[in-house]
Image (cartoon, rainbow, N blue to C red):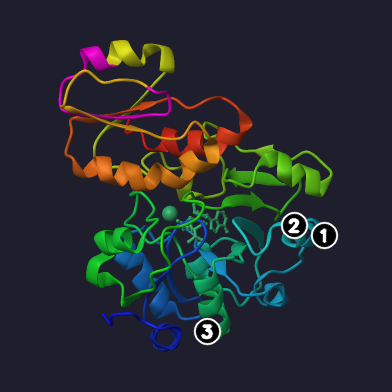
Amino acid sequence: MPTNPTIPQATSILRAGGLVAMPTETVYGLAADATNPQAIARIFSAKGRPTDHPLIVHLATLAQLKDWANDIPTSAYKLAAAFWPGPLTMILKKQPSVLPAITGGQETVGIRIPSHPVAQALLQAFGGGLAAPSANRFTHLSPTTAAAVKEELGDKVDLILDGGDCEIGLESTIIDLSSAPAVILRPGMISQAEIETILGCPVITRRQDVPSEVRVPGMHHLHYAPTTPVRIVRTEELTANLAMAKLPIAVLSYSKITVASEAMHHVCLANNAKQYAHDLYHVLRKLDHLECLEIIIEAVPNAPEWEAVRDRLSKATRR
Ligand code: TXA
Ligand code: MG
């Protein structure tokens, strides 16, 4: 792999059907030419991801949207004006030309225009759509640094563009606009309330316990999981649970607590959803390396701004 790789190097790898890890404002993506079936196949094999799980197509500009999506509703343009480039993915009816390997054989396609300057530079230089799932192995935590991508994928990726640590740290909000009413399939840092304000009507957030015919592997309960077992504990039960736990353990809280033993590896994150989200995957990855018996995580508040964090924490729990 070249040291200090450049956008032209990355572009020629993509044109040759290779895989490039690109930083985005949410998490790092594993990018390939979205029109090249062999390149798409390499994404699935590098991630160890089942092939019926659809991929998001990343674009540089709104002008490209019509090449990928069909029958685009006004709501999509309203949301694009408010949130693109940025951490929002829209599910829209697909153009017939979109490869079934991208859509998992469905009639819809996920589209996002990312804002990260490196992702933008790459997309503009490449000129077409880049299919890019998060750059981790299937069910693992999404990487928020170039080092985490290397740890996840090693030599399976041809080049890693290092764009520093990701500003948001959690994956994009996904909204399905392919039929009415609009449904949020994956909460993210663009909230339901912000979306409703722009659309001027209520939208639904699909709860994980509601079965659906739409395949969203992010809904799989082992998604976004460290390899160490994770247990979520309510704030008022934290002290008692720590006292009873078999050591060594890792503890992730946002309340300022003191731990009794050196065999309790404690990290206190910010009592602020945005900062907490930014740090979560990076810290979980570090705690996972400690090979503790379990990671005990203090349940986060029930307030709407914590929705995306709550969603990811519930999926990090192996049940
Ligand atoms: O922030 C993000 O969205 C990151 C960065 C790299 O852009 N990407 C990401 O991709 O999280 P991935 O593949 O790890 O998660 C994308 C989710 C999956 O759960 C997938 O099922 C869903 O988007 N998805 C993609 N296309 C879909 C479709 N046509 N219908 C329903 N869900 C779809
Ligand atoms: Mg993912």
Measuring 52% from the left and 31% from the top, which residue is drawn there? 209
Q: What stretch is highlighted in magenta?
A: 242-256
Neighbours of disc 1 within 10 Å: few (<14), some (14-19), many (20+): few
Q: Is mark 1 on a helix, strand or loop?
A: helix
Measuring 47% from the left and 39% from the top, which residue is drawn there? 276
Q: Mark 2 to mark 3: distance in Å? A: 25 Å
Q: Residue 74 carries which label?
A: 1
In the image, residue 232 lies at what x, y percent? 37, 25
Q: Mark 2 to mark 1: distance in Å? A: 13 Å
Q: Is residue 99 visible?
A: no
Measuring 26% from the left and 80% from the top, which residue is drawn there? 1
Lateral position of residue 204 relative to residue 133, left or right: right
Q: Which amino acid does label 1 sit on?
A: Thr
Q: Nearer the viewer, residue 133 or 246?
A: 246
State which mark lies toward you, 1 or 3: 3
Measuring 40% from the left and 62% from the top, which residue is drawn there? 51
Task: Please tell me whether residue 206 is drawn above or below residue 177 in the rendered image.
Answer: above
- Tag 3 or tag 2, which sits nearer the N-term? 2
Q: Mark 3 points at which residue?
A: 126
Q: Name the residue under label 2.
A: 82
Q: Nearer the viewer, residue 56 or 265?
A: 265
In the image, residue 252 lies at what x, y percent? 34, 31
